[in-house]
Amino acid sequence: MNNKLLLESLNALLDNEPDFIVAMANTSAFIFNEIKNLNWAGFYRVVDGNLVLGPFQGKVACTRIKKGNGVCGTALKENQTILVKNVHEFPGHIACDSASNSEIVVPVKNKSGECIAVLDIDSPLLERFGEEEKEFFEGVVKILEVNL
Ligand code: SME
């Protein structure tokens, strides 16, 4: 399935689902099963200004990440997508799964533009994510944000 069809399928899957936990759970399963070469796909929620593990697919992960720490905490602090071609070159990267080599993290924002969660995707391949993937995962998050 191409990216446009994947986004249409996700949109249909989440249509009229007001519960954010349900939406995060099915989105992580959808991404993990439909996108090749991933070893982790899931969410961290913002709780009291820091990140707490949410619905995900993949190996067990770190449960709490402080704002500004790692790739996820940096995405929260900067409130923008962080694309890391080689996690071993990212200062402060948090290695939950030693198989990860590249990563992309996209903030999920409410209607006021505040980051309320982050979508975190990891790959065992180096440079797995580029501009096309950035656009795709930002599209995924836009679908989620409709119901926030
Ligand atoms: N690598 C992330 C931590 C979360 S795990 O990849 C699931 C980071 O540096 O923030």
Image (cartoon, rainbow, N blue to C red):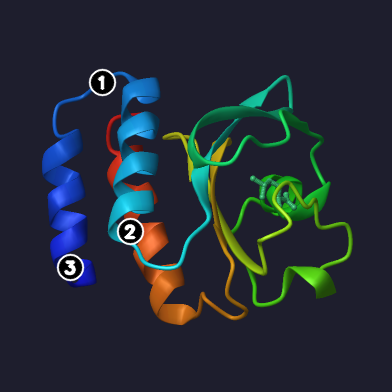
> Where in the figure is residue 53, as x and y percent of width and height?
62, 29
Looking at the image, do the residues carrying marks 1 and 3 touch, with CB atoms under 8 Å apart? no
Residue 77 placement (x, y as % from top left): 74, 47
Name the secondary structure under disc 3. Answer: helix
Distance from disc 3 to disc 2, alpha carbons, whole Å, reads: 9 Å
Cβ of mark 2 under 8 A from ligand 1: no
Disc 2 crowd rating (10 Å Cα; few below 14, some 14-19, many 20+) is some
Q: Amino acid at mark 2?
A: Gly
Of circles 3 and 2, the one toward us is: 3
What x and y, as percent, mark residue 61?
67, 37
- The answer to whether residue 82 is seen in the rendering is no
Check disc 3 and give the amino acid type: Lys
Q: Front-most of 27 and 114? A: 27
C-beta proximity under 8 Å, tags 3 and 2? no
Q: Residue at x 28, y 57 (%)?
A: 34
Q: Nearer the viewer, mark 1 or mark 3?
A: 3
Q: Which residue is mark 1?
A: 18
* Residue 1 visible, this orientation: yes
Q: Earlier in the sequence, mark 2 or mark 1?
A: 1
Alpha-carbon neighbours of circle 3 within 10 Å: few (<14), some, or many (≥20)? few
Look at 37% across and 67% down and name the residue there: 36
Using a 10 Å C-alpha cutoff, classify the residue at mark 1 as few (fewer than 14 neighbours), some (14 to 19) or many (20 or more): few
Q: Earlier in the sequence, mark 1 or mark 3?
A: 3
145, 40: nearer the viewer: 40
The residue under the point 75% across, 45% down is 73
- Which quadrant would residue 122 be assigned to in this image? bottom right
Q: Which residue is mark 2?
A: 139
Cβ of mark 1 under 8 Å from ligand 1: the answer is no
Left or right position of 21 against 38: left
Find disc 3 in the rendering and name its residue.
Answer: 4
